[in-house]
Amino acid sequence: MRLRSLLLLCAVVSLPVHVCQAQTADEQKTARIFSTLQSDSVRLSLFMRQFPKGADLHNHLVGAIYAESYLKWAAQDGLCVMVENGQILSHGCTGHDKGGIPAAMLPADVGAENSMIDALSMRDFVPTAKDRSGHDHFFAAFRGFDALTRTHAGDSLAEARDRAALDHVHYIELMVSPGLGGMIAAGNAHQLRGEDYAQAEQALRPLLPRLVADARRETDEMEQQAQRTLQCGTPQAHAGCGVKVHYLYQTLRIMQPSAVFAQLYAGYEVVRADPRFVGVNIVCPEDDTISMRDYDQHMRMFQALNAQYPDIKLSLHAGELTPGLVPPEGLDHHIRGAVEVANARRIGHGVDIEWERDATELLAEMARKKVMVEINLTSNDVILNVKGRSHPFVLYRQAGVPVALSTDDEGVSRGDLTQEYLRAATTWPLSYQEMKELSRNGLTYSFIPGESLWTDGHIVPACQDMMSKSCHDFATQNEKAGLQIELENNFIQFEATVAHNPLLTDAGQPG
């Protein structure tokens, strides 16, 4: 009822969302409490853990899983681990696996178990002569658990959903690659002639039905396994059953051009054929030799496919680079290429924006086009050593470019979305309303089907009365609006709880 009256006021007087929301007493009190808690890290964590988070839009499923889970599954499967090089093998130990031990034996060897956890994540990372940088250690971790990512995709999905529920995240847009091997093989079998993408499409088109069917089948198997693990639809259902999920089809850019194009072509077709998939991305280290050499060509591949699939949305990794990691000329156009050539709706990372040619003009263009940047604070710290006030988070906001916080690879980085919000809240003087804006942006700039509840900061006409039939019908027809309404209701519940929580109100505020 309070939300209906609040939003009716917004619609009548045409005030921006953040002004209207400040009308409630609980929200005003929560804002004062938050301001005080920014210097009280313990209670700020308590506050932020319960804070409703709209979405995690930059989340690689294989990297979202904690090392302990991978090691548990390896033990269940009877697999062998090579402690010295931090790798889980795809088979049990044999006489040929020198130094290998059964994963099931790790709990009895604390030193070996800790070594494996450290190798498969960023936990306690300290550079050594053989493991010199956070960047290299981070990406090497994926090779260590690669043997399990396909067979335990469903378990991984269940863990990601349960973790999101614990973190009060409404929606996750996971990057996954079902059927990838067949797509790469198809590309290798049909070599690209220069940049003749029309010819490549013609050669690959007969293979698309099988490639798409394989991807959908693997996705079905993943979701069925997750449903069993989460026990959805039963009295024992996990909280993760309530977290909404869609997928981005992620393609690998460290292949030869023919294999990259085949992945992209089939990935676009998967998104068109399967409503569970809402967009396409391209992944792997951006500073890789092939990634750098072929970056511009990859953008032109997207451009060519966009002409065939104009409704497919793109969120592209771009600008995950720093001076010294690549030559200066490698820093000056990746974000621009993703925005202007590939027509990306969102940019993942965008760390090197200040090194782009005509950065001020590019920022203005991104603001005008509402190209949102997925900010991954912990990831940018552990991989690139970009952190604190050296991060371009504030630069994007000052330029009017929309941003949202995300995790990237929370299992490898040993964090969660709450950690990202805490980093933001303790690094910059953000207000409570600005934290809510970050949360709302996650849903607003998601690729969830349907219209948004908000247009230019105002509620849509159909929902001037949130309890009306017109609003109910609007939310029923628009999945995105339904989740946004749920988020607003959760904000009201959260603020009512915080305003009367003695552990928080005692933090220098009147009770």
Image (tube, grey):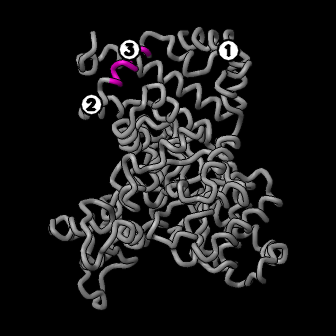
The part of the chain drawn in magenta is 28-35
Q: Which residue corresponds to mark 1?
A: 14
In percent of width and height, residue 412 lies at 37, 59
Work out whether residue 90 can be spotted. yes
Closer to the chain start, of discs 1 and 3, is 1
Say left or right for 282 vs 56.
right
Say left or right for 45 vs 428.
left
How far apart are the alpha carbons under marks 1 and 3?
24 Å
The quarter holding residue 162 reads: top left
Q: Residue at x 66, y 53 (%)?
A: 279
Say left or right for 51 vs 181.
left
Q: Main secondary structure of the magenta part?
A: helix
Q: Residues within 10 Å of mark 2 (few under 14, many from 20)?
A: few
Q: How many marks?
A: 3
Q: Examine the rendered structure and indicate whether residue 256 appears above or below residue 8.
A: below
How far apart are the alpha carbons under marks 3 and 2?
17 Å
In percent of width and height, residue 207 lies at 76, 73
Closer to the chain start, of discs 2 and 1, is 1
Q: Which residue corresponds to mark 3?
A: 29
Q: What type is the residue that disc 3 sits on? A: Lys
How far apart are the alpha carbons under marks 2 and 1?
35 Å
Q: Examine the rendered structure and indicate whether residue 356 appears above or below residue 200.
A: above
Regarding mark 3 in the picture, which secondary structure is present there?
A: helix
Front one among 87 and 18: 18
Front one among 352 and 83: 352
Q: Which residue corresponds to mark 2?
A: 39
In percent of width and height, residue 320 lies at 50, 61
Closer to the chain start, of discs 3 and 2, is 3
